[in-house]
Image (cartoon, rainbow, N blue to C red):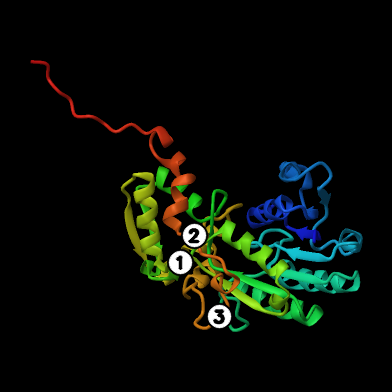
Amino acid sequence: MNHRVAILGGSGFIGRYIVKRLAERGDVLTVAARHAGSAKFLKLKGDVGQVGLLNVGIDDEKLLPAVLAGNDTVINCVGILRESGRQRFDMVHHTAPARLARLARETGAARFIHISAIGADPRASSAYARSKAAGEQAVRDAFPTATILRPSIVFGPEDQFFNRFAALAMVSPALPLIGGGLTRFQPVYVGNVADAVVRCLDDPASAGRTYELGGPKVYTLRALMELLLDEIHRKRLLVDIPFGIASLQARLMAILPNPPLTPDQVELLKRDNVVSSGALTLATLGITPTAVEAILPTYLDRFRRGGWYERRRMPMTRAD
C-alpha cells in the first residue's frame, strides 16, 4: 500500500532522509518547510509529481489544514537546538506540535509520527528538554495513537555535531570538554532514524508507543572527540572546562548572532544522553544500528589536510 504522507520539517537534517526512504518505496509526499525554495533538491528523491513542496511553517495554523488534508500519515521532524528570534523552544517543540497533532486528527490522518529526543523530561534543568517533554504529552493528548521517536545525538553528512567540532579543530589548537568530557552519548545514524520512521509507518503495533533510538555503542564526550580527531588526522589539546565556567562563557557568548554554546546546552550536558533501560529501541523495530566508525570516514575527509586524497609524506632518500 502506498501512503500519502505530510512531512513537517522535511527539508531538515532528519527530514530529508525520511523523504528519501518514503519516496523510494512509492509514497506520495507533501513536504512543508519554512524555506521551501531552498529544498527543491527533495523533488529529485522521487518521480515527477511524487514530492510536493509547500512554503508553510509548523506554526501556520491557517494553511496547515490544507496541507494535511488527504494525507493518511503526518510526520513531524521540526526542532531547534537553540532559540533565536521568534523560534522559541516552547513554540517549536510544544505548542506547534500540539496544534499539528490536533489538526492531523481533525483532517482524518490515521498515523502521526513525532520526532522528539532522548532526555525529554518535564523536570529537566534544560528548557530544551522540558519543551520536548511538554510536546510529547501534548501530542499524545491530541492524537493518542501517535508514535514518538526519541533519538540520541544524530550523526550523518549534514549533522551539527561532528561537522561543527571538526570545523573548530581546523582553526583552534584545542577542543573544549565541558564537564570534563564525562557526559555519555549513544550516537545514532540518521539513516537508522529514517528507517525507524518507515518501520513504524508499516507496523500498526507501533501506534501509541515511544521508541528510544541509539547506536550500538555508548561513548563519553571525550571519546567522541578523540574519535573525531583520529578520523581527520589532527592533533589537538582536549581541555577540561568545569560546568560553572562553561555556563559563564555561554552567557557571555549569548550576545553573538550565532553563539557556539548556550547556557541551555550546558545544562543538557549535565545529563547522559543514552537509551533508557527497558526502552523500546531500534532492535525492537528489527533495525541493526550502524556504528559511528562506519560512517564518519564517508563525510569527514574534507576536514583533513588534503581532503580524501591526503598524501602520506614519504621519507626522503639520498641517491647513491
Which structural element holds mark 2? loop
Q: Can you tell which mark lies on residue 216?
A: 1
Q: Is residue 261 left or right of residue 183?
A: right
The answer to whether any part of residue 220 appears in the image is: yes
Q: Is disc 1 surrounded by few (<14), some (14 to 19) or many (20+) residues within 10 Å?
A: some
User: Given contact means CB atoms under 8 Å apart, are the residues at marks 1 and 2 in contact?
Assistant: yes
**Percent from the top left, x then y, of residue 60?**
85, 61
Callout 2: 10 Å neighbours few (<14), some, many (20+)? some
The first of marks 1 and 2 along the sequence is 1
Label 3 secondary element: loop
The residues tagged by marks 1 and 3 sit, at their Cα atoms, a distance apart of: 14 Å
Q: Amino acid at mark 3?
A: Ala
Label ID, residue 279: 3
Residue name at image x 68 percent, y 63 percent? 198
Q: Which quadrant is the N terminus positioned in? A: bottom right
- Circle nearer the N terminus (1, 3): 1
Image spot of residue 259 (x, y percent): 55, 55
Horizontal arrangement in the rendering, residue 21 relative to residue 296 (left or right): right
Viewer-proximal residue among 153 and 267: 153
